[in-house]
Amino acid sequence: MGLSSKMIIDVLFIKVDAFDSPGFINDLKKSNKNYIFINFNPKKGIYVGKNNINFKSDNFISKMFLSNINARLYYLFYPIIFFIDYFNFFFSLKRYLKNFTEIKNVYCDNTFFAFFISILKKRFFIRNFIYASHDWLPYDKSRKFWSLFGKNIFLILDYFNSKSCNYIFNHTHYVSDLRNKKWKNKFIDKSIIFYPQLFFNPKIQNFGKLKNQICFLGHVKDYRGLTLIIDYCFKKKIKLVIAGMKNNITSKLEDYCHLKNFNDTLKVTGYLSRKDMLKTVQSSFLGVNLTFTESYTDIVLPSKLFDYIQNYTPSLVSSTQLYSSNLINKFNLGEVIEKDNLDEVSYKIEKIILNYESYINNIKKFQKDYRETNIFNYLV
């Protein structure tokens, strides 16, 4: 089907291509609904993803501005680049949606893109809009100028989206409680605690697990936690692989390894396709997420954690990661670090290695007992 052929779409997803995408697709394949994903890649831009209407996948709708610029320069000019990107995204998305005469349902998990949908809702006859924001940025107590600016913009857009949408999917009760408190329960009737679709592939149980590799997925924000992992890895002659984009913190980690003469201990891959990123998890015996500074990510549902779990990889997280640590402790999916020191990190990793099979069995039990939210209950 060519892009000139206009049609009615049952479900449009606008989302980051993350751990929950395969689960959505698996459910949609069992339905009689036509669907299309418009995926957001923070390094590349927005592009056509999986669909069953014969639209070409991986076809970019709009690319990021200066996406390949040096990481430190990018962060220096980040606010300006950010606004250029999203300004361009809005008009590119608006042009693309003209391919459809009506869109019955839109699911969007990005606050800024959800704002675009709120604006375009009447223009494209969107009958049902699900705002599935993962985040609550004001939880972050940083008082840096651009952080304060970003948090205030988030609040304005979040209120507008919450008012415009039919349902608010909160991925954790922490986010739900903070959102409802901020808006004085004005949107509580449309507020849902959402348990995302997961997709476990039994073919990769213990697939290629290397006893000499630990991985971290995604965007690095905390320096201290990963230096502890690097110290452990050097002591045990194993490797830490950071599967994600390079930034100022990964540069500091590389400098740390160079200063300590920790040769071959750290590998920072830079941008990876999702397929290659998952291969990194599948060939690692442990996934980590140690943070020791307060951040809004403490209360959200981190994609990396479920990428570890869905690939049968035990996790090591810090107790500051409130949602992750509670989940891991409840189902024994890994270990939680309480203290910021190498002795505890070493003890917990050795505990996982010693009881590795039991952690894998706990993940399998979690898979069996997990109950996802049926999104079809919220579609028209």
Image (tube, grey):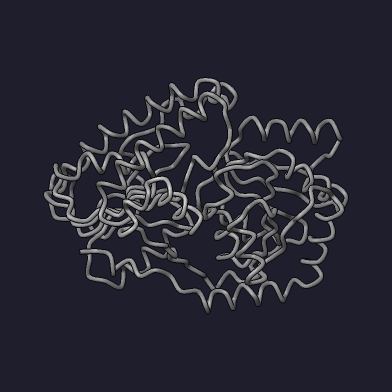
Q: Residue at x 48, y 59 (%)?
A: 173
The total of numbered circles placed on residues is 0
Q: Residue at x 26, y 34 (%)?
A: 92
Q: Who is closer to the viewer here, 116 or 236?
A: 116
In this rendering, position of residue 164 left or right of residue 330 = left
- Residue 142, horizontal then vertical, whole percent: 58, 33
Picture quarter containing residue 346?
bottom right
Q: Who is closer to the viewer here, 180 or 51?
A: 180
Asked if 138 appears above or below 233 in the picture, the reply is above
- Residue 254, horizontal then vertical, whole percent: 74, 34
Asked if 80 appears above or below 102 in the picture, the reply is above
Q: Residue at x 52, y 30 (%)?
A: 147
In this rendering, position of residue 151 left or right of residue 169 = right
Q: Residue at x 28, y 39 (%)?
A: 116
Position of the C terminus by quadrant: bottom left
The residue lying furthest to the front in this view is 184
Q: Who is closer to the viewer here, 243 or 219?
A: 219
Asked if 350 appears above or below 288 in the picture, the reply is below
- Residue 236, horizontal then vertical, whole percent: 86, 53
